[in-house]
Amino acid sequence: MKKSNSMRLRMSLFLTLLILMIASSAPGEDKLPEHLQKKIEQVFPVSKIIKIEEENYKGNVVIEVELMAKNGTAYEVYLTKDGNIVKIEEEDDDFSWFK
């Protein structure tokens, strides 16, 4: 009986660690490189980043950053990897609950 309980405990710990590892490496949860973070802060000071993804825009790979501006407006900002802003779109989604 002790071996069975010990095995269950080990398996539970293993599965918990596995779930935590998978959750921590979920796509879109990574931090922006520092130079891109600074660019976002220049254009949208005191904003809250909601999501980060790599996208294909007109044949080029860009970083899409969904954010909530200080005034509560949601935006999608598309940046090149070297920090040039390609496009800024105001989001139609209502993130008023997120403030």
Image (tube, rainbow, N blue to C red):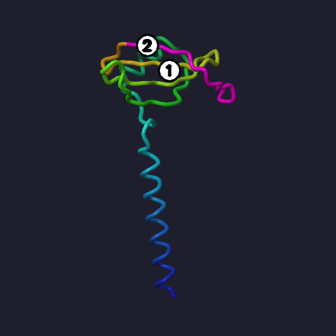
- Can you identify the residue that label 2 sits on? 87
- Give the residue displayed 69% in from the left and 29% down from the top: 97
Q: Which mark is residue 76?
A: 1
Question: Where does residue 49 sit, x and y in percent of width and height?
Answer: 52, 26
Q: Nearer the viewer, residue 62 or 19?
A: 62
SS at mark 1? strand
Q: Which residues are magenta?
A: 85-99
Quarter of the figure that contains the C terminus: top right
Q: Nearer the viewer, residue 80 or 6?
A: 80
Dot 2 surroundings within 10 Å: few (below 14), some, or many (20 or more)? few
- Give the residue displayed 51% in from the left and 25% down from the top: 66
Dot 1 surroundings within 10 Å: few (below 14), some, or many (20 or more)? many
- Give the residue displayed 52% in from the left and 88% down from the top: 1
Measure the C-alpha gap from mark 1 to mark 2: 8 Å
**What residue type is disc 1 on?**
Glu
Q: How many marks?
A: 2
* Labelled pair 1, 2 in contact (Cβ < 8 Å): yes
Q: Is residue 27 above or below residue 46?
A: below
Dot 1 or dot 2: first in sequence order is: 1
As for residue 41 lying within the magenta part, the answer is: no
